[in-house]
Image: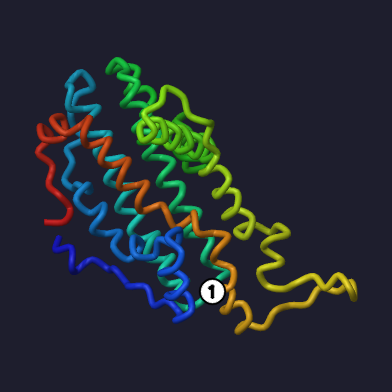
Amino acid sequence: MNIKKFPNPKLNLPKDLKKKAKEDPALFFKYVDNYINLVGKYIYTDINLDYQPVDDNHIHAWIQRIVSANLLRSLYIRNEFVETINTRNFVGMFLPLKAWFEIVGVLASILDLLEKKLSKEDLREKLEPYCLGNRGITKIGEVESINVLTMINKANRYLEKMQKEVQNKDKASPETFFTSFYDTASNPSHPSFDSMEMVGFLDEESGTWRAELPDNIKEKIVTSIDGYGGLLMSPLFIENICQKIFLIEKDKFFKLKSKKYFD
């Protein structure tokens, strides 16, 4: 598929938010706009999954499918986030941001398994929930998907390892970046205190709660984005993790002879 033909709406930021993004390097809107170019080269299609379990290609086809499917899904998640910005839907903005963070989690989990250099049998067993796992009535056999917070914790571990590499140290302080920001995005996504304050405010003097007008909620895209800037870092984390996965799997993926999704 020609990458230029893939749905890829551009951000239409308010003037004040454009200015804020230029002044604050933690607002990674430019990477949101360029996301398809950051990760498109890591997405494959026509992946042969019909190898026998004893064949070395079997497990690597699984890995390529997990990575490709999650990255392709993340392009649509990114688009949903862009639409919420463009329509100034501050309330709806947190659902795709949270889902985007989960993509970081699953890819960090796959990288963690690869770096452990497990036996083929152990790796296949560990990968099965990521490849076949579901929850509820759509569960495939007895395979249950990995808990989301478990994957987010793997993202924390990935960041901790990154910190050690950059600082050239044996130890690094434990990271909670992903769990902290995932919780930050989860509160407005659920019927919690934060979600109620998204659409109104508590007036302590009068002891009343007052619902916001739609225009006031739209303005929060600009006035309240600062506290959520870390959630915009998903594109960079995902690209970095993909680089590491493909460095490990490069020769194995080449043997699969799968086609790149974007030609």
- Residue 213 percent across, percent down from the top left: 67, 83
Residue furthest right as drawn: 206
Nearest the viewer among 75 and 165 is 165
Residue that appears at 40% across and 52% down = 234
Residue that appears at 48% across and 79% down = 16
Residue that appears at 17% across and 27% down = 57
Residue that appears at 33% across and 60% down = 31
- Left or right: 253 in relation to 181: left
In the rendered view, tell whether residue 45 sits above or below residue 22.
above
Nearest the viewer among 246 and 16 is 16
- Residue 60 percent across, percent down from the top left: 22, 30
Amino acid type, callout 1: Val
Mark 1, residue position = 222
- Residue 242 percent across, percent down from the top left: 28, 42
- Left or right: 75 in relation to 257: right
**Residue 124 in which image quadrant:** top left
In the rendered view, tell whether residue 239 sits above or below residue 21.
above
Nearest the viewer among 59 and 180 is 180
- Residue 233 percent across, percent down from the top left: 42, 53
**Residue 49 in which image quadrant:** top left
**Residue 149 in which image quadrant:** top right
